[in-house]
Structure formats: structure tokens, C-alpha cells
Image (tube, rainbow, N blue to C red):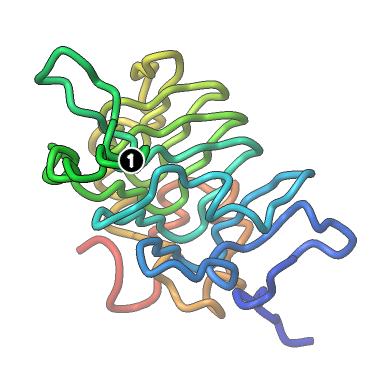
Amino acid sequence: MPLVPADPTVLHPMPGQPRVVQLKPLVTSPLIEVGEFSYYDDPDDATGFETRNVLYHYGPEKLVIGKFCAIGTGVRFIMNGANHRMDGPSTFPFPTMGGSWADHFDLLTGLPGRGDTAVGNDVWFGYRTTVMPGVRIGHGAIIGSGSVVVSDVPDYGIVGGNPAKLIRTRYADEDVARLLAVAWWDWPAEHITEHVRTIMSGSIDELEAATPAGRGSR
């Protein structure tokens, strides 16, 4: 019987579980990019991810999420539109209230930003994580529940707390380099299907041995 890969275009991949959505077929905003098989889980309204979970997203900064990311309920990405002026006596955004105050909208343009928010591949976000603007989260990272991520997270790092701090890395530096060279998330879907057990529970040696010819470590 042939092995059949999962379908990255299906909105609800788990039968009978509308709380789980794959984000790539859901997202419509040009400011959000999501890789295949990354999903969001929410019992209330998972399909509202773009408006309920990506906040103050007025651009031009983008939210970029890699492949195979697991995003728990209540995770929020705060974008740079949440920024306020801090160089004067008041931080209040008067021009947004309208009236003659709107004549001063130039006071809200050109506020400092940190650029795009970028999430690598195979990242697991715990329940109610908050990610602040411009953060870079590496491949294979784990973000503990309730964390507030204010700074970059290394590849295969585990962080937690408010503000989130590095607890440990999942592998030694040399093994992280091997995993990044393998980059299993870029394998053809058919090859991933054949080696799911190795990807989920195998050793790095086994993962390297399963890497398609022409890919992975040299």
C-alpha cells in the first residue's frame, strides 16, 4: 500500500476537530507568510488567527512563520504598530482620535521598528505565549507556556518566563549544526512520509542516514 503524505492545503487537518487549522491555507494578509503544515489550535475561533492573534499589524513589517510549527491556544504576535512615541511628555497617540488632532499624524509616522518578526521551522509555542515585535526565533525552538519573548531565540533553544530567558538548548552546538544541515523540513513530502518515525523519535545519526541524496550534511 503506497504511503500518502498529509495534505498541506486542508484547512482542518484533524477530522472532527475544528479547533485546529493549518495556517497556510487560512492566511490572506500579504504581511503574513506561513510555511506548510504549521498549525494553530484554539477551541474558540482558530480561523480568526490573522485578527485575533496577530495584533497591531499595520505594516510594513511582516510576520514570517516557517514550516511544521505548532502554535498553542492564545499565542499572540505583537507587531510594530503597537509602538508609541516615547520622546515627549506623553505617549498617547492623539492623532488617531480624529478631529483637528489628526492634523498631527506625522507625529506617528516613522516610529522606530525592529523589522520583521521571523519564526523558523519546527517551532513549538506553548499556551498563551506572547512574541514582541522584530523577534527572531530559531529552528527547532520551544517557547514555554505564558512566555513573553522580547529577544531572539537560538536554534533548538528552550525559553520561558517573562521576559523569556534561555533555559537550555535541546542539543549541543555541534549537533545543532548537524540538524540544521539535514534540514528535514525541506525534504520532499514523500520522503518525510517515509521517515516520520525517524524525524519524531530517531537519533541524529539516523536522521542523517535518512537524508535524501544531495541534501544534508557534507
Rendering coords of residue 134 (x, y %): 25, 40
**With respect to residue 102, does 93 lie above or below?**
above
Picture residue at 29% right of the left edge, 24% below the top: 92
Residue 21 seen in render: yes
**With respect to residue 76, does 88 lie above or below?**
above
Q: Nearer the viewer, residue 24 or 171?
A: 24
The residue under label 1 is: 96
Picture residue at 55% right of the left edge, 37% below the top: 75
| Residue furthest out toward the front | 100
The amino acid type found where label 1 is placed reads: Thr
Picture residue at 21% right of the left edge, 16% below the top: 90
Rendering coords of residue 21 (x, y %): 68, 60
Q: Nearer the viewer, residue 217 or 104?
A: 104
| Residue furthest out toward the right | 16
Rendering coords of residue 152 (x, y %): 26, 32
**With respect to residue 128, does 119 lie above or below?**
below
